[in-house]
Amino acid sequence: MDETVRLPGAAREKAPWTMSRVLPACGVVGGLLFIAVFLVEGAIRQGYDPIYHPVSALSLGDRGWIQVASFLVTGSLMIGFAAGVRRALGSTVGALLIGAFGAAQIVSGVFPMDPMRGYPPGAPLGDPVETSWQHQAHDWGGVVVFFALPVACFVISRRLTGGWRAYTLLTGVAGLALFVWFGVAWEENAANAGLIQRAAIVVDWGWVVLLALHLRRSTSHAEPR
């Protein structure tokens, strides 16, 4: 028996438009959720210094499950947003890069970093001589997160025009520059390493939120009434 779902004519016409609005919404919710969680948790965690410690350290300690959940939920939503980018802009490579960005966030949640640099409270003040394989997987996930999205900006900019193209290119440049700056600051154990990483996150995830809103608005204007 053919169990394929067949939508009525009106519903069949409406479904593509609905998905074109729901999928970009994943980017709005995911970007805002991730930023809100690390800002709130970073402000209230005992012993945590948001200027010094990375966002990933919030996955440690008694409340670590909150940041882990943020990684998992946001990563899943970004994969949905990637499908929305493919549908709205027709950029397969850009969508794959955003999908990798989301998948790497899931990896970062599944494999937390090792306790170090004084967090959680009681952890060594410095770095361990050897890190666990989970920490290494987390690091590689972070590399993909902060590299894939700026590259996606360069790819997707070719599908945009005017101010949106300029903003997207600027985001790609700023995202890569902040990623490199954070890497240097982390290796040097700089006092402002956490702040630099937060700047990179706001630039990258903020672009996702704004682009998602733009795509939803464009779809809404184009939708037949």
Image (spheres, helix red, strand yellow):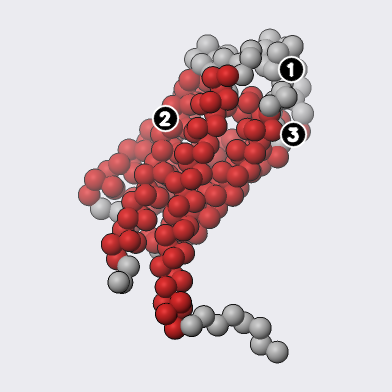
Please give the residue where the numbered disc 2 appears in the rendered image.
177
Q: In the image shown, does 208 or 171 lie closer to the viewer? A: 208
Q: Earlier in the sequence, mark 2 or mark 1?
A: 1
Of all residues, the one furthest to the bottom in this rendering is 1
Query: Which residue matches tag 3?
Result: 134
Is mark 3 in CB contact (under 8 Å) with mark 2? no
Q: Residue furthest left?
A: 162
Q: Find the distance from the CA under tag 3 to the CA under tag 1.
A: 14 Å
Q: Where does residue 75 sit, x and y in percent of width and height?
A: 58, 45
Determine crowd level at label 1: few under 14, some 14-19, many 20+ residues with C-alpha closer than 10 A. Answer: few
Q: What crowding class fits label 3: few (fewer than 14 Cα within 10 Å), some (14-19), or many (20 or more)?
A: some
Residue 10: x and y, percent? 42, 80
* Residue at image point 27% right, 43% down: 166
The picture places residue 106, in percent across and down from the top left corner, at 64, 43
Position of residue 138 relative to residue 102, above or below, is: above
Displayed quadrant of residue 110:
top right
- As shown in the figure, which amino acid type bears the numbered disc 3? Gln
Mark 3 vs mark 2, foreground winner is 3
Q: Amino acid at mark 1?
A: Pro
Direction from residue 1 to residue 27 in the image, left or right: left
Q: Earlier in the sequence, mark 3 or mark 2?
A: 3
Disc 3 and disc 2: Cα gap in Å?
27 Å
